[in-house]
Amino acid sequence: MSSVRVSRPTYAGYRTRALEVDGSGPRFVLLHGYTDSANTWDGVLSEVGASGGSAVAVDLPGFGHADLLGPNPVLPQLDAFVAELVRDQSSRGPVVLVGNSLGGCLSVRAAAAGVPLLGAITIGDPAAGPWRLRTWAGRTRTPLLLRFAGLRLPIPARFFWLASTPVVNRLVYANGRRADRAVIMRYITFIQTRGGTGWLARDAAALAKELVNGHGTIEVASPLLIVHGVKDRIVPVRGSKALHASLPGSQLHIEPRWGHCPQLDDPAGIAELVTTAAAAWQADEPQSIDLA
């Protein structure tokens, strides 16, 4: 079993934190979602390391312990970071890019941009198909609800924690009653440190404006597996179905047990899923991805 190693590399000018397990086979490069960090993949890294595999999870610029992003637009900066990250990790083996939420969007964008990959896996991609927040953000006049949420209102820390915890539990996990308190604390602490709900509303709306047209018309040369949890309460499953329909040759796996962050719900299941997909792609033998 390989232990997790921590390093502080720099990609595209952004210093980040990388959590790595070294082993054989494809190199799984793991990208987290919005307001998250590389630690969201702790369970998956343990599973991959225990099986002798090779993987790295990084903090995306602007999150975790990585450098802050420059002024908008955000997506081109993240695209450049991911492209350089993949080029670097390719020395460890053929790269399978795995992303959750915002990281899933970046995985598809990298594949569409021709970044050399054995394959890409996107989980709960917010740029896939129709999504209400993107529609709202695309309006000329910002909706009243988002404008109110974006106000810089002083909110007592205790109230912020009490109000935020059940919401984050429900949004992140398939079953909020099974939420890991340390994980929820990580999310809420990050948001509170950056400026609370006001910062979150303004920042999320700005990013959503960049995603307003979704992925648009794209072609993906490398294999692509689209994954979505039925209990995802942030991004609707129909988005992943639409992305799959628009990309002939892509695979779709919809899992009834998972929520928006299945790497937290079921790290063993995600590790099995990505390992099975990578093995099929390496063998160049298409097969269905089934965990039943």
Image (cartoon, helix red, strand yellow):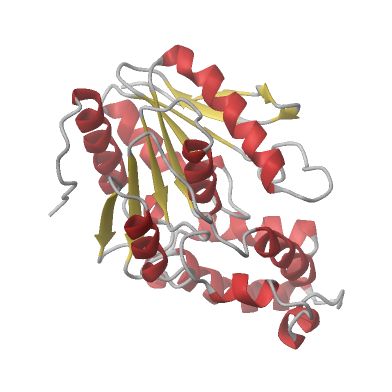
Residue 92 placement (x, y as % from top left): 43, 14
Residue drawn at point x = 36 percent, y = 51 percent: 247
The reply to whether residue 277 is in sight is: yes
Residue drawn at point x = 72 percent, y = 28 percent: 15
Q: Nearer the viewer, residue 67 or 228?
A: 228
Q: Name the side, left or right, on which 142 lies relative to 166.
A: right
Residue 272 occupies quadrant: top left
Q: Nearer the viewer, residue 44 or 97?
A: 97
112 over 204 or under it: above or below: above
The reply to whether residue 265 is in sight is: no
Q: What is the total number of numbered labels drawn onto the structure image?
A: 0
Q: Nearer the viewer, residue 230 or 64?
A: 230
Residue 20 placement (x, y as % from top left): 48, 25
Residue 281 occupies quadrant: top left
Residue 90 placement (x, y as % from top left): 47, 18
- Extreme residue toward the top, this view: 91
- Extreme residue toward the bottom, this view: 144
Quadrant location of the N terminus? top left
Q: Nearer the viewer, residue 247 or 277?
A: 247
Residue 12 placement (x, y as % from top left): 71, 27
Residue drawn at point x = 72 percent, y = 85 percent: 145
Quadrant location of the C terminus? bottom left
Residue drawn at point x = 34 percent, y = 17 percent: 23
133 over 190 or under it: above or below: below
